[in-house]
Amino acid sequence: MDEDSTIKKREIEHRYRKHTVFISGSAEEYGSWNRFEAQEFIHKLSKEIIKARFTIVNGFGWGVGSAVINGALEAIVENPKKYSDEQLILRPFPQFKTGDKNLFELWQDYRERMIPLAGIGIFMFGNKLKEGVLINADGVRKEFDIAIRHGLVPIPIGASGYETKLIFDDISSDPAKYYGPNKWIFPLIEEISRDGLRMDNIVKKVISILKKLQER
C-alpha cells in the first residue's frame, strides 16, 4: 500500500471512529435511581445516539446492555429509511471457556477488539455482585483503560455512581490528559456528574457533546 492509500485509509478510519460510540456499563443496582428510571434513561440515551446518526458499539453489559439494544432498535424500527441496523454493533461476551483461555482472558480479548472500533466512550454505573456483596465493577475500569489507550474521548456519567464516579474523579484530577485541546468538554462532564440532575438533561448534554465532537 502506497503512502497516499495509507493516509486515505487512516482518514476513513478516523471519520468512522468519530461517529462510533462505545457504551460501557454494568449494574446490579442503580444507586439513587430505581431500576425503571435507570433503564428508561439508558433506553432514551441510546435511542437519541442513533437518531443523532452515530453508531453504537456494545458488549451487552449486565443490567445495561438490554436497555442499550432496545433503545437503539426502537429508533431504527421507527424510521428504517433514516436509520440502519448497521448503527448497532453488538459484541456479547462469551459465557464459556474456549480452548486454553479462561473466561477472564476471553473477555479481555473481546474488549481489546471491540473498543478500538469507536472514537468515543460513554461510561455509566459499574457495579456487580461478588459472593452476594455489591462491589464496583472492575470490567468497566478495564474498558476505560483500554479506551484511553486507544484514544477514545471518555464521557463518564458520574451521576450514575459506582466505578464511573471514580473514573470521573480520575479525569477531574487532570482533564487536559484526557481531552487535550478540547477544553470545552470537561465543564459538561462536570455537569452530568452532579447529583440531582434530571435524566432528560443528562441525555441532552451527552448528545450535545457527541454532536460537537462530530463537527471537529
Image (tube, rainbow, N blue to C red):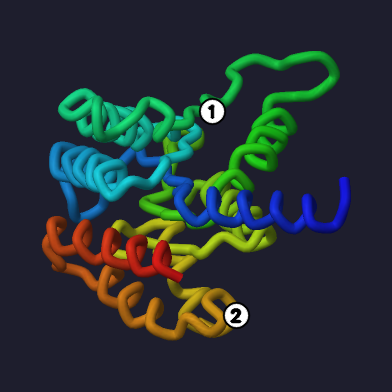
What is the spatial separation of the Cα atoms under label 1 and label 2, in whole angstroms? 29 Å
Quarter assignment of residue 79: top left
Sequence-first tag of 1 and 2: 1
Q: Judging from the image, what secondary structure is the residue with disc 2 in? A: helix
What residue is at 63 percent from the left and 50 percent from the top? Answer: 13
Decide if residue 89 is on the left or right side of residue 124.
Answer: right
Vertical relation: 120 (above or below) 29: below
What residue is at 74 percent from the left and 32 percent from the top? Answer: 105
Label ID, residue 177: 2
What residue is at 24 percent from the left and 28 percent from the top? Answer: 81
Q: Which residue is mark 1?
A: 91
Crowding at label 1, few (<14), some or many (≥20) Cα neighbours within 10 Å? Answer: some
Image mark count: 2
- Which x, y percent locates residue 203? 21, 57
Q: Nearer the viewer, residue 200 or 21?
A: 21
What residue is at 21 percent from the left and 69 percent from the top? Answer: 195
Residue type of the residue flagged with mark 1: Arg
Tell me whether the residue at label 1 lies in contact with that at label 2, contact meaning CB atoms closer than 8 angstroms: no
Residue type of the residue flagged with mark 2: Lys
